[in-house]
Amino acid sequence: MQRPLGAQISHMLKDRGVDVIFGIPGVHNQEMYRGIEEAGITHVLARHEQGAGFMADGYARATGKPGVAYVITGPGLCNIMTPMGQAYSDSVPLLVISSCLDETAAQKGQLHQMKDQRAAADTVCDWSLEARTAQAAYALVDRAFTEFQTQSPLPKHIQVPIACLEALAEPAPLMSAPPRGVGVRAEDVAEAVARLKTSKRALFVLGGGAVRASEQARALLERLRAASYVTYAGSGIAALDDPLCYGAMLGTDAAVAELRKADLVICVGTDLAEVDHYRAELGHDAPAIHVNLDPAVLSRAKAGDHKHLADAAAWLAAVNAALVGHAPVSAWQTQEVAQARARGRAEIDAAYPGIGAVCDALRAAVPRGTMIYSDMTQIAYTAKIIWDMDRPGHWHHPCGFGTLGYATPAAIGGAMARRGKPTMAIIGDYGFHYTMQELGVAVELGLSLPIILWDNGKLKEIEDSMVRAQIAPNAVIARNPDFCKLAEAFGALTQSPKTLEALQASVQQAFHADGPTLIYVTPDITG
């Protein structure tokens, strides 16, 4: 059945497993909206394209499926470029489909015109390409979905000229068999096994690329009695009760001494980026094995390190199988790990006085399996280090690009994907300004979403940094509104607890509310 191409694309996405699309319609992309309902896809109307992108990002992180967003030509694409950059930095499968003008070289002054919007988007994603025919659009969509499954998942952008979206097109081809993932070479497994069998202090660093391999990772850690660190994205991969897990304290000074104790470091599914440890180098002296799907990450390994291009789950499973029957000789002691964790916690408490107690209270109040989306704010900087997650893939932070305003819309996308399961946002007062309008979306959707708003009345982290650099703090304070009245104007519920006990009660109540609850917290809550 022929339909306008804009409608055919929605039907194709449904065939590829897409159930939700986030976006904002406009005169230039309205043909993309013709087929959404007919295809059986739910559309979530954001208040700003930046919010749509973050929602799609949050949905993707919650489900492991690609998050999809529809935006208009020009400003719509520009507005979503920040979420695209965040998704690129954090390896999130985000697919942005936009309209584009049919011709820009010979005319100027057209609605939403840019000199080269495709090239602009290309700076913040894996690739940005234009489909000038229906066949090209279908091929690019399938290319994106194939790469999401077989490579490090990175955001993609496809733009389609308006006239092409409006033209009748045949349906997309049926979905082909899912692609096979990157396999594991037998020689890589043999090499790793040989090293692990002779190691007495094997230390694993488990990143976001191993989130869906936690079962295999836990089995291997137990088999070897190996110690481990998790990155912020990898929090929860190691078992909550594993006494040899240092947690997400890789960036603390205490971690350096522990890393130097290792005689073999195995980095699985982590880029070991600056934002993972905030040092020039990780800090280990031992040889290392790197397991990653991204050749660019492997290329940065030190001379003498071993590089395995492989899926984390497949690699861990193969090594586990090859070590059946092996009796490890491990020198790691639970006491030394506990002492290092205590030193790391002391560092964090000294850097952010009082905030640790708030995080501890929150952690005790939320139900198991809560998925958390945090923002660039001091309470999140503290929590993502000291808060041990009970399962992987449940703490999401804008680590690399480091944008403000991520948490609220991303949590909406996550809650949309997890209806009936607990989801929570943690955001600072300044970051809340960036995307506060998306609160209306959470109200419309009736999401039981607690939003912890930490109001210290300033850009406190920047103020502290200026002081450390002996710069007189400047431009770090902005006048805030009455956040509770603002949230109530959107139709949200509000709470303003004055004690940690009241905070816990507010959070527990918010998980059962009929809509979102803004929970307003200031540093005075610690007394």
Image (cartoon, grey):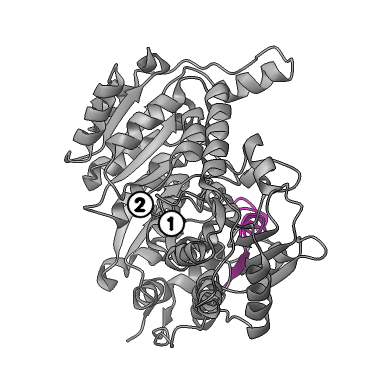
How far, Cα to Cα, is label 1 from label 2? 7 Å
User: Viewed as shown, does residue 154 lie left or right of 473?
Assistant: left
- Nearest the viewer among 342 and 206 is 342
Q: Which mark is residue 61?
A: 1
Q: Position of residue 238 (x, y in %)?
A: 46, 55
Q: Position of residue 202 (x, y in %)?
A: 63, 59
- Nearest the viewer among 83 and 228 is 228
Secondary element at image label 2:
helix
In the rendered structure, does residue 114 fall within the stretch colored magenta?
yes
Secondary element at image label 1:
helix
In the rendered structure, does residue 180 fall within the stretch colored magenta?
no
User: Viewed as shown, does residue 486 lie left or right of 427?
Assistant: left
Q: Position of residue 130 (x, y in %)?
A: 59, 70
Please tell me which residue is depicted at 63% across the width and 36% down the height of the picture. 254
Please tell me which residue is depicted at 46% across the width and 29% down the height of the picture. 379
- Nearest the viewer among 422 and 268 is 268
Q: Is 497 rendered above or below residue 432?
A: above
Name the amino acid type tagged 2.
Answer: Gly
Neighbourhood count class around disc 1 (C-alpha, 10 Å): few under 14, some 14–19, many 20 upward: many
- Identify the residue under disc 2: 414
- The quadrant in which residue 199 appears is bottom right
- Which sits earlier in the primary sequence, circle 1 or circle 2? 1
User: Do the residues bearing badges 1 and 2 touch, measured as CB atoms within 8 Å?
Assistant: yes
* Residue that sits furthest to the right in the current view: 303
- The quadrant in which residue 277 appears is top right
Please tell me which residue is depicted at 26% across the width and 71% down the height of the picture. 38
Q: Is 312 rendered above or below residue 448?
A: below
Name the amino acid type tagged 1.
Answer: Arg
Specify the segment rendered in magenta: 108-130
- Nearest the viewer among 21 and 459 is 459
